[in-house]
């Protein structure tokens, strides 16, 4: 432990304070806007804290009265959950066998590199044929169609993370089980997967966050409450045609809550997942 | 034993029959509208509820997108089997929608009663090549709104009749220190800017196209942009206008921060009687001014119509819904936000009471409505023009050069 | 077990993943290549073969060239700022101070915030009439009148970069922090004894540990910045006067707003090629750095 001069210590604390303010100020402001009466938000000079705290917009957006603005918002919330959930489960299901295969048979690794390289493709390069293909299959404006597209964004990441996870599990444990007469599937289920469970959790969370964040494909491939996701709903609100800024902010807070909570709770796992490839490389 | 089987079978048959009956009766329509304030989202939902009450067998799912997304959403949804049945479309799109087979021709569905009752000007909204692709729903143009209190303080007795007068009055207000930047417009890089520009083009007697080729780069088209640039650089126009859409203009006007504003019908009652408005009771409205020797008033055709998409499985029900939405009864009921398409409504006290000033302005403005060009390549031309307007405002190039390159990039 | 059987089994296990990737990415990509040589429209006509017309037209258009410059500027400035701010924040978070654990936890928040929400938030902050930025700066006295942050070509792109940085530098910071924690304490102690100054210490002792992880972050962020769509779509849609229009927005306009699927496809492939070249250049750089530090 190096010793520090008091001046340096004060400097460090000031920097930390500055960093905390930079990170928090926009987020706190988002929340304050969501509980401020509309008049406060168009006051000059701006009122930084509402005269009367107003939570009514949350009720408005979360109401489920048929054919209301709230119903449209909750529908998009549900669609986001369903699409992200389906895509995540499928991405893990594909990642387990593929990640294991590459981990145990490195000669097939080049194919995984190719899969990961698809990350470089801008979505606009695939959008037109995907649009036509989904239309031909009747999958436009459905949660399944969107989840299928998302799967290809998530699967490269989950497979790569699962492969790194399997790499840390010694083959000897598996061979021992196989010697005892267990089949491949049994060995994986009883021995390998429980050991890889933490990595699987991290991969699933990552995948969920990625899917929750997606906007471009959702913008193109969904058109109404049957499949429209939260990101598109918020972009519609933010488009300059809603004059109550507080309502836009409320939608933002609601959309941010699930990923922010996940991020907070799982932070250690997320960071180790983020850095595992880098630190080793 | 056999008895109970028979009974069960009959029960099942009855049950399935009742399901089948329900399946037959219940039709679900998907309709696309825009999120805005003229017929707000809440109003459109209330109209749909009234429709479903009158037609319990038809359910309507409503979808709202900002105007900026309306065109792309409509086109993109064409590919999906269960796309929209009814779409709201702007006056500028029938040409493109007709040539790309997005909307169906509904000429044969339009009754004589409709033909006679609806204002002739409104029909231009939905027609292309002699066919009708829907019913007009929002009959709208941009008016000049003014803050009576500020004008009074500045010693101005009558609102401007010409655009030059507008500039003079704004200068008086600025010089007296009442407002730093008295005029608010919607000049964001969006269709809204084109609507303001078109209003000015109509005042200066310009043309967008001549023989299918761009003609806005000289004459009235150039004068119109020059007026905008002068108003902007002289500091009479709120400089934030270049990122404003209509709702921003309304907010600024309602806050008493603009003496003049160009906006659609809906602003009148919201600003003059709205709970959030700080200028309630002080709002004046006149037709957008003219240019001495060229025009008395100016106006852009900003009307919108409702049409049936070519992928709709339920065109009959869709038309029923459109007929309800555009009926005189519905339109009169919501006439405080959007004036009816029906001629006789303008003599109906239920419609005119409380908004005589607006009706007065509408009689002149609606008659002068000037169309944006009818071309399947409208989107490209508009995008090029939006860029030109902003470049000229920002001083990146002269109005003339900007319009010339817009003409080259217009795709025409 | 024989090697060939292992390999066969591995391929069998990978089949579901590969099948999905080929169907949803491979096939559309091939299709895009095909489309790019036609004048196909988005809906309706399949189009006729026009050779390399689309490519010639797109590459020579002033719109494309200007948009390329805008995109490159956005990518370079935002990624560079994120790297510098991220490393500085990581160095800070690696020091001892009260509340360090809490501050480290806070860093995850901007990253977890959905991109569209972030864009919406900053659009409200930058609002020319009622935004918090104008209000704060005027009340402090840093500016004397409200400004149109997203309405001036000079400031709009910078405003977008700030919004993008705010969301992404904490991620770089977290990656760099994890790498810093891997630097053995005795090495830093030894360098202190040797009398190395703070800058030299950072350059020769700490940076080698950071280089690998930062390189990964750099590559990922650059690719993402080149593909940027969401934040611009929500905040400016490319305005004012197209000063914030990036390549992805231009492709969207061409293919979907104007419905010219053919030329849109050619433009999209040009973008893809650029991103690939960029990634290859980085890969070469990574190999060189790895060779030097090893």
Image (spheres, coloured by chain):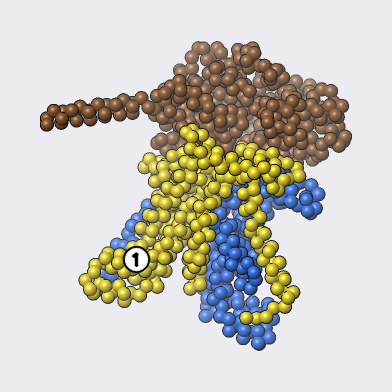
Chain colours: A yellow, B brown, C blue
> Is A123 rendered above or below residue C280?
above
Quadrant (top left/top right/bottom left/bottom right) for the N terminus of chain B: top left
Residue for point 53% across, 62% down: C220
The count of marks equals: 1
Element on which disc 1 rests: helix
The residue that disc 1 covers is A193
Give neighbour class at mark 1: few <14, some 14-19, many 20+ (Cα, 10 Å).
some
Is residue B264 visible in the rendered image? The answer is yes
Quadrant (top left/top right/bottom left/bottom right) for the C terminus of chain B: top right
Q: In which quarter of the image is residue C113?
A: bottom right
Q: In which quarter of the image is residue B290?
A: top right
> Is B340 rendered above or below residue B401?
above
Residue for point 82% across, 36% down: B179
Of C118 and B307, nearer the camera is: C118
Residue C198: % across, % down: 68, 78
Residue B20: % across, % down: 30, 28
Residue A16: % across, % down: 67, 66
Of C86 and B304, nearer the camera is: C86
- Chain that bears disc 1: A
Of B404 and A83, nearer the camera is: A83
Residue A191: % across, % down: 31, 69
């Amino acid at each position: 432990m190096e010793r520090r001069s008091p001046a340096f210590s004060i400097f460090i604390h000031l920097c930390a304070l500055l960093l905390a303010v930079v990170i928090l100020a926009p987020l706190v402001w988002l929340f304050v806007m969501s509980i401020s009466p509309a008049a406060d938000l168009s006051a000059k000079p701006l009122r930084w804290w509402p005269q009367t705290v107003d939570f009514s917009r949350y009720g408005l957006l979360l109401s489920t009265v048929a054919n209301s603005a709230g119903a449209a918002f909750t529908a998009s919330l549900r669609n986001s959950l369903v699409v992200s959930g389906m895509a995540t489960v499928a991405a893990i299901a594909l990642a387990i066998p593929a990640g294991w295969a590459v981990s145990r048979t490195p000669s097939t690794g080049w194919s995984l590199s190719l899969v990961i390289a698809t990350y470089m493709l801008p979505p606009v390069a695939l959008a037109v044929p995907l649009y036509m293909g989904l239309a031909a299959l009747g999958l436009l404006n459905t949660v399944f169609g969107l989840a299928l597209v998302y799967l290809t964004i998530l699967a490269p990441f989950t497979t790569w993370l699962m492969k790194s996870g399997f790499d840390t599990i010694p083959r000897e444990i598996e061979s021992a089980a196989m010697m005892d007469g267990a089949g491949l599937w049994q060995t994986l289920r009883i021995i390998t997967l429980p050991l890889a469970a933490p990595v699987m959790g991290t991969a699933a969370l990552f995948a969920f966050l990625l899917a929750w964040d997606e906007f471009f494909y959702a913008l193109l491939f969904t058109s109404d409450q049957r499949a429209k996701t939260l990101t598109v709903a918020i972009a519609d609100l933010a488009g300059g045609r809603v004059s109550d800024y507080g309502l836009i902010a409320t939608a933002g807070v609601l959309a941010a809550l699930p990923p922010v909570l996940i991020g907070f709770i799982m932070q250690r796992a997320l960071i180790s997942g983020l850095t595992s490839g880098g630190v080793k490389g | 034993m056999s008895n109970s089987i028979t009974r069960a079978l009959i029960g099942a048959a009855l049950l399935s029959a009742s399901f089948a009956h329900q399946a037959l009766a219940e039709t679900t329509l998907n309709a696309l509208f825009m999120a805005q304030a003229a017929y707000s989202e809440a109003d459109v939902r209330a109209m749909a509820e009234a429709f479903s009450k009158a037609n319990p067998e038809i359910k309507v799912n409503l979808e709202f997108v900002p105007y900026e997304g309306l065109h792309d959403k409509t086109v993109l949804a064409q590919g999906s089997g269960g796309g929209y049945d009814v779409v709201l479309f702007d006056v500028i799109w029938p040409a493109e929608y007709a040539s790309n087979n997005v909307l169906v021709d509904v000429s044969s569905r339009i009754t004589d009663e409709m033909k006679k009752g609806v204002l002739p000007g409104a029909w231009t909204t939905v027609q292309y090549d002699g066919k009708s692709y829907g019913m007009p729903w929002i009959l709208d143009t941009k008016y000049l709104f003014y803050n009576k209190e500020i004008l009074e303080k500045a010693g101005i007795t009558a609102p401007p009749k010409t655009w030059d007068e507008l500039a003079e009055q704004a200068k008086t207000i600025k010089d007296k220190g009442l407002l730093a930047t008295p005029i608010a417009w919607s000049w964001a890089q969006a269709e809204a800017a084109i609507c303001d520009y078109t209003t000015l083009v109509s005042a200066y007697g310009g043309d967008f196209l001549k023989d299918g080729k761009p003609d806005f780069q000289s004459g009235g088209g150039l004068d119109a942009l020059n007026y905008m640039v002068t108003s902007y650089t002289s500091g009479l126009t709120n400089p934030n206008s270049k990122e404003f859409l209509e709702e921003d203009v309304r907010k600024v006007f309602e806050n008493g921060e603009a003496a003049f504003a160009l906006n659609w019908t809906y602003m009148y009652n919201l600003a003059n009687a709205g709970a959030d408005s700080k200028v309630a009771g002080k709002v004046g409205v006149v037709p957008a001014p003219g240019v001495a020797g060229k025009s008395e008033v100016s106006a852009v055709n900003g009307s919108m119509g409702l049409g049936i998409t070519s992928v709709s499985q339920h065109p009959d029900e869709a038309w029923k819904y459109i007929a309800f939405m555009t009926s005189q009864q519905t339109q009169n009921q919501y006439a405080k936000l959007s004036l009816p398409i029906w001629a006789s409504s303008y003599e109906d006290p239920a419609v005119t009471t409380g908004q005589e000033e607006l009706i007065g302005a509408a009689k002149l403005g609606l008659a002068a409505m000037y169309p944006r060009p009818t071309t399947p390549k409208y989107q490209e031309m508009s995008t090029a023009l939006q860029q030109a307007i902003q470049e000229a405002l920002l001083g990146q190039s002269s109005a003339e050069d900007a319009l010339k390159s817009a003409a080259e990039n217009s795709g025409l | 077990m024989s090697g060939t059987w292992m390999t066969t089994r591995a391929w069998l296990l990978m089949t579901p993943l590969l099948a999905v990737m080929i169907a949803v990415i491979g096939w559309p990509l091939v299709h895009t290549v095909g489309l790019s040589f036609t004048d196909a429209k988005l809906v309706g006509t399949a189009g006729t073969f026009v050779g390399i017309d689309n490519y010639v037209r797109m590459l020579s258009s002033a719109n494309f060239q200007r948009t390329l410059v805008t995109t490159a500027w956005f990518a370079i400035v935002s990624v560079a700022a994120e790297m510098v701010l991220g490393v500085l924040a990581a160095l800070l978070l690696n020091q001892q101070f009260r509340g360090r654990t809490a501050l480290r936890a806070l860093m995850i928040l901007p990253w977890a915030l959905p991109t569209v929400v972030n864009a919406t938030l900053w659009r409200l902050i930058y609002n020319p009439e009622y935004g918090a930025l104008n209000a704060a700066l005027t009340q402090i006295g840093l500016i004397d009148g409200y400004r149109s942050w997203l309405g001036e070509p000079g400031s709009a792109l910078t405003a977008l970069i700030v919004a993008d940085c705010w969301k992404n530098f904490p991620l770089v910071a977290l990656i760099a922090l994890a790498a810093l924690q891997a630097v053995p304490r005795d090495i830093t102690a030894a360098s202190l004894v040797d009398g190395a100054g703070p800058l030299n210490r950072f350059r020769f002792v700490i940076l080698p540990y950071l280089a690998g992880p930062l390189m990964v972050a750099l590559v990922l962020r650059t690719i993402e910045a080149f593909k940027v769509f969401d934040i611009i779509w929500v905040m400016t849609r490319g305005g004012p006067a197209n000063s914030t229009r990036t390549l992805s927005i231009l492709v969207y306009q061409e293919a979907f707003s104007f419905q010219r699927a053919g030329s849109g496809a050619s433009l999209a492939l040009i973008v893809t090629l650029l991103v690939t070249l960029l990634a290859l250049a980085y890969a070469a750089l990574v190999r060189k750095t790895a060779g030097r530090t090893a």
